Image (cartoon, grey):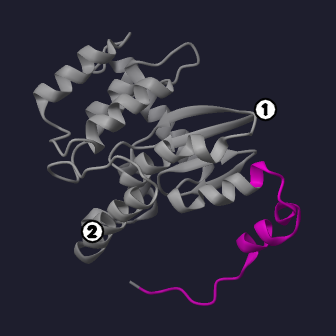
């Protein structure tokens, strides 16, 4: 059985699409998925990047593309009333619902993803947040110091692994980033011979030709 760690932030539409499409990708493979919330903004800060929604033309393209991807894959999807939004309360809520393994299960993760990406409503609305919290019945206080520490630890773990974006799926120490990496993941789990060749490691060994100044 393969252990697959799914690192995500509810703010990412690509993470939502990957979450919804993952069962189809994994069908027929023996696996266990561990859902790990992380703060996407911390990954961006670590690598000196802006988020897609912080670059105006890229923001427009992102929303067009995710809407098309949802249509292409028959995934129920509506943009929230405003984006980006502060995902911290939702990330902490997910971790406050964590089970015996310390991570939220698929039901809790799905419930919060649907809160954001279905219905076209305000993901950060306090009344809606109160309602989804009541629905999930977290075992910990989402605002408690222990839950905040869990989120920091999860994000630090992601940074230590070299994550730079979400969603990222990690299996056997290999990182698969983005919704469009799901076919790569599927082929890896199926034992595609390409992964036994030099290509994976060679990509990391390519010399840098020039560095942009300033």
C-alpha separation, residue under disc 2 versus residue under disc 1: 38 Å
Nearer the observer: mark 2 or 1; the answer is 1
Q: Residue at horizontal 41%, vertical 24%?
A: 108
Q: Is residue 162 magenta?
A: no
Contact (Cβ within 8 Å) of mark 2 with mark 1: no
* 69 relative to 29 in the view: left or right: left
Q: Residue at horizontal 57%, vertical 90%?
A: 210
Question: What residue is pinned by disc 2?
Answer: 59
Sequence-wise, the earlier of marks 2 and 1 is 1
How many marks on residues? 2
Measured as percent of width and height from the top left, residue 42 is found at 39, 49
Q: Is residue 51 visible?
A: no
Measured as percent of width and height from the top left, residue 106 is found at 49, 28
Image: magenta residue range: 188-213
Q: Is residue 62 visible?
A: yes
**Farthest residue toward the bottom?**
210
Question: What residue is pinned by disc 1?
Answer: 1
Residue 209, which numbered label? none
Q: Is residue 190 magenta?
A: yes
Q: Residue at horizontal 64%, vertical 83%?
A: 208
Placement of the N terminus among the 4 image quadrants:
top right
Placement of the C terminus among the 4 image quadrants:
bottom left
Q: Nearer the viewer, residue 169 or 152?
A: 169
Judge the density around disc 2: few (<14), some (14-19), many (≥20) Cα neighbours within 10 Å: some
Q: Assign a secondary structure to mark 2.
A: helix
Above or below, comparing residue 152 to residue 210 in the picture: above
* 31 relative to 98 in the view: left or right: right
Q: Residue at horizontal 54%, vertical 62%?
A: 180
Measured as percent of width and height from the top left, residue 164 is found at 50, 57
Q: Assign a secondary structure to mark 1.
A: loop
């Amino acid at each position: 059985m393969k252990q697959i760690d799914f690192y995500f932030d509810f703010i990412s539409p690509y993470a939502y699409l990957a979450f919804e499409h993952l069962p189809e990708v994994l069908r027929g493979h023996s696996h266990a998925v561990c859902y790990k919330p992380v703060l996407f903004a911390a990954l961006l800060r670590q690598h000196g990047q802006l988020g897609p929604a912080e670059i105006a033309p890229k923001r427009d393209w992102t929303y067009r593309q995710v809407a098309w991807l949802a249509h292409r894959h028959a995934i129920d999807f509506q943009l929230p009333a405003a984006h980006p939004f502060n995902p911290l309360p939702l990330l902490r809520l997910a971790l406050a619902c964590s089970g015996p393994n310390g991570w939220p299960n698929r039901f809790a993760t799905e419930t919060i993803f649907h809160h954001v990406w279905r219905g076209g409503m305000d993901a950060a609305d306090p009344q809606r947040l109160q309602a989804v919290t009541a629905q999930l019945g977290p075992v910990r206080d989402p605002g408690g110091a222990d839950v905040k520490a869990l989120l920091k630890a999860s994000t630090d773990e992601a940074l230590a692994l070299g994550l730079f974006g979400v969603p990222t799926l990690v299996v056997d120490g290999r990182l698969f980033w983005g919704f469009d990496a799901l076919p790569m993941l599927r082929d890896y789990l199926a034992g595609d011979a390409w992964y036994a060749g030099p290509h994976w490691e060679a990509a990391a060994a390519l010399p840098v030709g020039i560095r942009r100044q300033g």
